[in-house]
Amino acid sequence: MTPRAWLHRLLGIPTTRAIRGATTVPHDDPHQIAVAVTELVEELTEANALAPHEIVSAIFTVTTDLTSAFPAVAARAAGWEQVPLLCTTEIPVPDGMPRCIRVLLHVERAWGDRRPVPAYLRGAGALRPDLALAPSRPRESPAPAVRRSRPAA
């Protein structure tokens, strides 16, 4: 830890960190996208004990096979009304994960001993198997925890 980071933690000075998350949907359907994004937003909010005012911004990406809905619409409906949101598409890499929705949150808060907790739901756990090693780890743990894939809604 750098001296600056140590001082910020000691004094409770807010710093900005990024939190990653991803999920998948079985089909390109607006309802399925809304359900998956709501689930992802709620998981990230709960796992990191986020207040909406702490979220600086969120960037959602979708694979090119998802064109029926904007993830930001579901995020707003799930409570992120005042968060600046952006949606874009992923690079169409051959053999990439299909029907995947990713998010990158920028959060400003006094983190103390907490670390950002990513959330990889449903089939997206395969994106970061290194983080999916301990799915039942308590949320207070300083190491990242990832939930294993959930069954499709």
Image: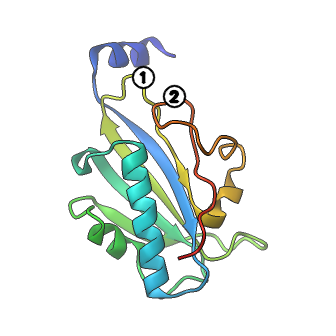
Q: Residues within 10 Å of mark 1 (few under 14, many from 20)?
A: few
Picture residue at 28% right of the left edge, 20% below the top: 12
Where does label 2 land, which residue? 142
The reply to whether dot 1 and dot 2 touch (C-beta < 8 Å) is yes
Whole-percent x and y of residue 31?
A: 43, 84
Spot occupied by residue 4 in the image (x, y as percentages of width and height): 40, 16
The residue lying toward the viewer, choosing from 8 and 151, is 151
**Residue depicted at 58% across the width and 47% down the height:** 146
Q: How is the image coloured?
A: rainbow
Residue 49 lies left or right of residue 145; in this view the side is left
Say which residue label 1 marks: 113
Examine the rendered structure and indicate whether residue 135 appears above or below residue 152. Answer: above
> Amino acid under label 2?
Pro
Q: Could you tell me how far apart the alpha carbons at marks 1 and 2 are, in whole angstroms?
A: 7 Å
Q: Is residue 23 above or below residue 34?
A: above
Q: Please tell me the numbered disc located at residue 137.
A: none
Helix, strand or loop under label 2 = loop
